[in-house]
Amino acid sequence: MNVTEYLFEKTAEWQKDFVLGNRETISFKTLYEHSSHLANYLEETVGTGKNIILISHNNNFFLTCYLGIMLSGNVCVPLDPAIEQQNFDYITHKSEANFCFIESRLTQKISVDTIKTITEMNLLQATANQNRFKIAENFNGDSPAQIIFTSGSTGFPKGVVLSHNNIIANTESILHYLHLNENDTIEVVLPFFYCYGLSLLHTHLRVGGSMVLNNNFILIGSVLNDINKYNCTGFAGVPSHFQILLRKSEKFKSAEFQSLRYVTQAGGKLHKVFIEEFINAFPQIDFFVMYGQTEATARLSYLEPKELKNKLGSIGKGIPGVQLKVVNPKGEEVQPGETGEIIAKGGNIMLGYYKEQQMTEAVLKNGWLYTGDIGTVDSEGYIYLTARNKEFIKIAGKRVSPKEIEEVIVSFPQVVDCTVEAIQDDFAGDAIKAVVVIEKGFKTNLTAEDLKAYCAGKLAMHKVPKYIEFTENLHISSTGKKVKVFNN
């Protein structure tokens, strides 16, 4: 089944608003019609099975293009609006994309001259004379629906290929344990180029719920106002969202949220102290701790709110339809207290990495996804994450390659070497720290602010180190390999 068809299966004719908010609204019916018209246009213009890039903040333009691309049988490649030109060029070349939907204001930052583009300014004009799209009866649900590019260990992005059936399977699982219905409305602060954000879109579109799009979480007051103004029943965030709400907002813990019945947290480990703070402040709101990966479409596990106090620190068990276990290097399940790698199996597991067979074979083995994350289990089968994949750091729910940041910093004159790592920050959770080795005698001239400004010109803001430490010593082991030395 085509995933867009699945998402609109019950709601294609509904006049009810799917998107709520001050800036723009759109009904289920209008969204489906616009997406369907776009699908017809794409089939006539580019055919099917092509990779099509989409770069936009969360808005009606993104929704229309995202759903229309997949409905047409083409493959959506959603990218971060803050993407660097180098990465955009790399992905465009890698995916062989020659068509791009881009928000007009982003064309001032990203050069898209080499491929055909459509912005929100001319989208409706391009699709004005189209009819509703008709999906082929023999549509293959195992065909690619989207490619989500994430940071690779080499510093270059790698594409996670997800099928229509992958998205459908994960959506069904999430709906099963969150018990969502048409009366649910969610406050969305997560971007849609991120699989966690997309899962919110998929679930609420499927059940006929609504969404309030807020692209300005930094304005905490607007988020809190939205929740009450639109009677939001749900909120989803990464660790930094909850830490900021709990520690930087004077109003949050004393606020009353009459409609809010649950929140979900994923995108990295939230320290137990913050979970306890939240559930003590809002005992009536269900707090779902979740764990997942882009390679699993979004979700892999969840912890029931009723188990939160007894299993604090656990990521729970596999979501419905997913087998999740912890194994040792021999592939045997570990005993309680032992550690091993978390592996998963289910209909939500990716098809593979785009044009990366060797990399795919390294993580997909006998139908199981080897997550690269280290964990342990207790006597009741609850899983506890003990370490994230060593190749990446997670900042605000986004996977970041240290190598990419290091490469930028060492390109600065007088910098000899650089080591980047995530450290604990009182407010932001994980933050980026860079230890920079400089030429002797240069320290008095080069400042941390100089390097941050330099990085800001070449990297997305979430990749710019928050902390920079200077040293004149390069630490190496007896084998000549660099040794990371941090004084946190």
Image (spheres, rainbow, N blue to C red):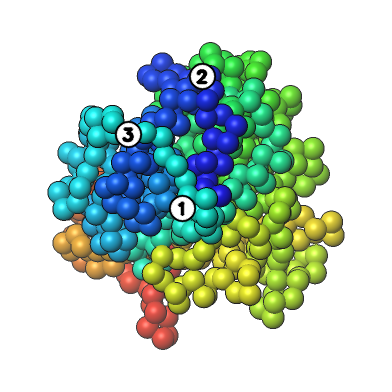
Which residue corresponds to mark 3? Answer: 130
Which residue corresponds to mark 2? Answer: 15
Precedes in sequence: disc 2 or disc 1? 2
2 and 3 marks in contact (CB < 8 Å): no
Farthest bottom residue? 479
Count of all numbered marks drawn on residues in the image: 3
Q: Position of residue 202 (x, y in %)?
A: 54, 39
The kind of secondary structure element at disc 2 is loop
Give amino acid for label 1.
Ala
Precedes in sequence: disc 2 or disc 3? 2
Can I make out residue 117 in this image? yes
Return the mark for residue 293.
none
Q: Position of residue 123 (x, y in %)?
A: 27, 33
Give amino acid for label 2.
Gln
Closest to the observer, 147 or 67: 67
Which residue corresponds to mark 1? Answer: 145
Q: Position of residue 458 (x, y in %)?
A: 23, 51
Q: Position of residue 396 (x, y in %)?
A: 47, 44
Q: Quadrant of residue 120?
A: top left
The kind of secondary structure element at disc 1 is strand
* Foreground tag (1 vs 3): 3
* Foreground tag (2 vs 3): 3
The CA span between labels 1 and 3 is: 22 Å
Q: Residues within 10 Å of mark 2 (few under 14, many from 20)?
A: few
* Foreground tag (2 vs 1): 2
The CA span between labels 2 and 3 is: 21 Å
Q: Residue at x 72, y 64 (%)?
A: 325
The kind of secondary structure element at disc 3 is loop
Q: Residues within 10 Å of mark 3 (few under 14, many from 20)?
A: some
Closest to the observer, 306 or 357: 357
363 left or right of 464 in image: right
